[in-house]
């Protein structure tokens, strides 16, 4: 059955935006990612048997697009140039630092680790669901999850070794 | 619960997938083991950093409401081949032919009225045998009023 990209866009764009925003922490970047992801779908027309497969494909491509954008030097420069803090200055700086930490951490992960982290933290999937979607064993999914969190923790610890960050200041 | 069991269940604990008795046992172990407590707290803090600012689907729907679906790239029009060449093409070919003719004329000149013997001599003795030249001379003596072309043809015919 051919994939109807327009229908997929209408039903899944919010989900893609949610993932992208959680990774980018910037509305405009997230909207760009949504467009890029569905353009890739339009170009490649992946063979997706069911909506679950479409969601899995979208999650994987969203992660890749976000990482690609981060790695693009021009996008990085544009992000810095177009940054306009909306909250108070101190809050904005802190949020930006935290977002940069997250960028660095997510960029350092393998794709499977990132997908497990996205499924767990953004979609509240169980390890069983994640394992089924990625075609891996449940213990492997748990290992990826812990390693991904460890990478984030290391970044946070390196950036700010004060105990309050390690103990979950943002929670 | 010992440290090994705790770490086996660490992912479930941080992700909130442990049932109540197991969670209680894990928390009890964390009270007694500082290393495991530090580890669990650090991972929970990392999870909080990742989950911070995750918007709801409703909010995401609102933010993306104005987006329009991407359109496919424009299809390139098919190249239509003409059955007959354009007039400009014909003129171009004609100009090339004329130029080639003019170049040849300017290089060699028009030799219809020249003496064929001179032309043959210019073309090189290797291409004209001495015998042919002798016959041409003889034809000139025999038919002094004939044209150069007639004498040449006569010399060739006698060969």
Image (cartoon, coloured by chain):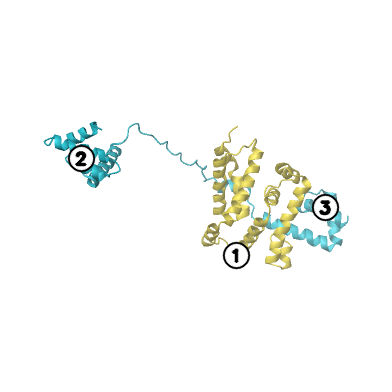
Q: Which tint is chain B? A: cyan
Indicate the chain coloured yellow by its letter: A
Is residue B85 something one can see in this rendering? Answer: yes
- The answer for how far apart the CA atoms under marks 2 and 1 are is 101 Å
Label annotation for residue B8: 3
Labels 3 and 2 in the same subunit = yes
Q: Secondary structure at mark 1?
A: helix
Q: Nearer the viewer, residue A17 or A78?
A: A78
Q: Nearer the viewer, residue B109 or A84?
A: B109
Subunit of mark 2? B
Labels 1 and 3 in the same subunit = no
Task: Decide which of tag 3 and tag 2 comes sooner along the chain.
Answer: 3
- The answer for how far apart the CA atoms under marks 3 and 2 are is 111 Å
Subunit of mark 1? A
Q: Residue at x 57, y 50 (%)?
A: A33
Give the labeled residue for mark 1. A93
Q: Quadrant of residue A154?
A: bottom right
């Amino acid at each position: 059955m051919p994939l109807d990209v327009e229908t997929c866009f209408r039903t899944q764009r919010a989900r893609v935006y949610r993932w992208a925003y959680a990774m980018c922490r910037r509305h405009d970047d997230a909207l760009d990612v949504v467009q890029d992801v569905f353009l890739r779908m339009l170009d490649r027309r992946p063979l997706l048997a069911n909506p679950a497969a479409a969601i899995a494909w979208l999650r994987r491509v969203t992660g890749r697009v976000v990482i690609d954008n981060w790695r693009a030097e021009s996008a990085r420069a544009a992000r810095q140039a177009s940054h306009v803090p909306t909250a108070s200055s101190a809050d904005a700086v802190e949020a930006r630092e935290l977002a940069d930490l997250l960028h660095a951490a997510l960029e350092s992960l393998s794709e499977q680790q990132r997908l497990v982290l996205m499924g767990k933290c953004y979609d509240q999937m169980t390890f069983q669901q994640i394992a089924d979607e990625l075609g891996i064993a449940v213990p492997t999914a748990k290992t990826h999850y812990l390693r991904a969190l460890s990478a984030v923790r290391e970044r946070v610890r390196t950036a700010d070794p004060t105990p309050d960050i390690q103990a979950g200041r943002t929670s | 619960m010992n440290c090994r069991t705790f770490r086996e269940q660490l992912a479930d604990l941080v992700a909130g997938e442990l049932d109540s008795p197991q969670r209680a046992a894990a928390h009890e172990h964390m009270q007694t083991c500082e290393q495991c407590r530090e580890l669990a707290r650090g991972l929970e803090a990392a999870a909080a950093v990742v989950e911070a600012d995750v918007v709801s689907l409703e909010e995401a729907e609102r933010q993306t409401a104005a987006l329009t679906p991407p359109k496919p790239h424009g299809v390139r029009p098919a190249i239509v081949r003409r059955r007959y060449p354009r007039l400009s093409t014909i003129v171009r070919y004609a100009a090339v032919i004329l130029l080639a003719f003019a170049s040849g004329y300017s290089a060699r000149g028009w030799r219809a009225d020249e003496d064929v013997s001179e032309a043959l001599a210019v073309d090189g003795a290797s291409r004209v045998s001495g015998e042919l030249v002798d016959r041409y001379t003889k034809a000139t003596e025999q038919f002094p009023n004939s044209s150069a072309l007639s004498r040449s043809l006569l010399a060739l015919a006698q060969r």
